Structures are given as C-alpha cells and as structure tokens.
Amino acid sequence: MTFAAIVVGGYLLGSCPWGYWLPRIFRGDDVRKSGSGSIGGSNVWRTYGPKLAIPVMLLDALKGFVPALVGVLVVSHLCGILAGAAAMLGHARPLYLRFEKGGKMVATGAGVLIAVCPWVAVAAVAIWFALFLLTRYASVASIVASLALPVCAVAFGYPVAVIVFAGLTGAAVTFLHRGNMRRLRAGTESRFRGLRGLRRATPV
C-alpha cells in the first residue's frame, strides 16, 4: 500500500506544471503559446529570462527528487525509481493540464537521478554543462548527457535496476528531443547567446 501510494504521489507531484503556473501568476501569460510550446525550463528561459526560468528548473527538479528520495528511504530503491519515473511521466503529461504536452523531463529526471544514483547525476550534469558551454545548444547537451546515463551507471557500479532506469530515461529524453534533432540537421536550432539572448531560429 505504501509502495503504491508513493508512486501515485510521484505522478501527482510530477504533474505540477511549474513552467505553466509561474508565468501565469507573474506575467499573466500562457507559455505554451510561445517558443516551442513546452512548459519546460528552456522555453520559459527563452520567453521570460532566468528570473522565472531558474525557479521553474529548481521546482521541476524537486518534484522528481522528493518522491524518488521518499521511495528509497521509506520502501526500497525500486520504489524510489518507480516513483521518480512516475514524476517524470507526470511532467511529460501533467494531470493538471488535462494530460496535454508538458516538458521534456530533463530537470525532473535530474532530480530523480540525484535521489537514486547521485554519482550518475553529477556526471550527467558535468557532461551537460561542458557540452552546453562548448556548443550553446541546450538540446545537444541534453541529448548527449541523457545517452551517457546508462554508461555512467555501469561505470559507477550501480545495480541493474538503476542501469535499466538510466537507460530508459536516456531513451525517453532523447525521444522527446526528436524535433530538436531534426532542426539541428536542418541548421535551424536555437542557440543560446549569453544569459538571455538567443539566435532567432526555431525554438528548442
């Protein structure tokens, strides 16, 4: 019963669309009508800048971290993984937005990884920042860091359940970036310039 409650709670918490709510509260706008239409931190940053995007990213990470950590501490590692996966699903298809398009699970997935396999999370974040600084493409950094997750899990000696979760997470995040990959091939992907500026192109 506790196992199921934590997993369901993970989905409900993951469904909290902070990238939609905060712009609604502070700007009176629907972020889904701007940029890529995503409620993720990248689109919020593009549309409103870091003052709204940074809180969105932190809250999105926390909604993955909290249920995953509770699952690990209260029940088992498997419960934490499933609760975190449920939170990621909630972020991608939020209940509170009637299961419409959500975000791409990068920040929420990072929060889950911090709870269930912190060294993998540290490695993935380092890869993300290195590639972002090198290329200025958030999408490239996210895709490569996601694909590196299972490799890092194996390298750090985590159990099979964590390796499988890391692999599925990497595959899911990469799949959600398929539009970005098409734009990268076409040379129309948006590229960050400084903290606020973006080269005007098709959004991430």
Image (spheres, helix red, strand yellow):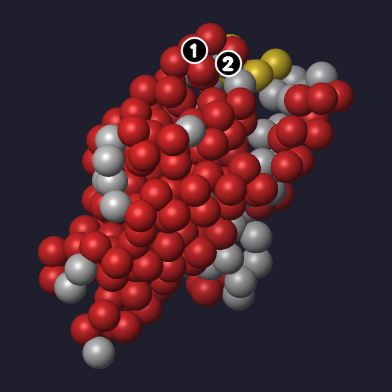
Judging depth in this view, the residue of 116 and 66 nearest the camera is 116
Residue that mark 2 sits on: 136
**Residue 41 x %, y %:** 50, 40
Residue at point 17%, 73% (across, down): 75
The picture quadrant where one finds residue 57 is top left
Q: Quadrant of the N terminus?
A: bottom left
Judging depth in this view, the residue of 5 and 24 nearest the camera is 5
Judging depth in this view, the residue of 4 and 147 nearest the camera is 147
**Residue 77 x %, y %:** 24, 63
**Residue 124 x %, y %:** 39, 31
What element does badge 2 sit on?
Answer: loop
Name the residue furthest left: 73
Name the residue furthest right: 186
**Label 2, residues with CA under 10 Å away: few <14, some 14-19, many ≥20:** some
Real-space CA distance between mark 1 and mark 2, rounded to the nearest whole angstrom: 6 Å
Mark 2 residue type: Arg
Residue that mark 1 sits on: 133
Say whether marks 1 and 2 touch (CB < 8 Å): yes
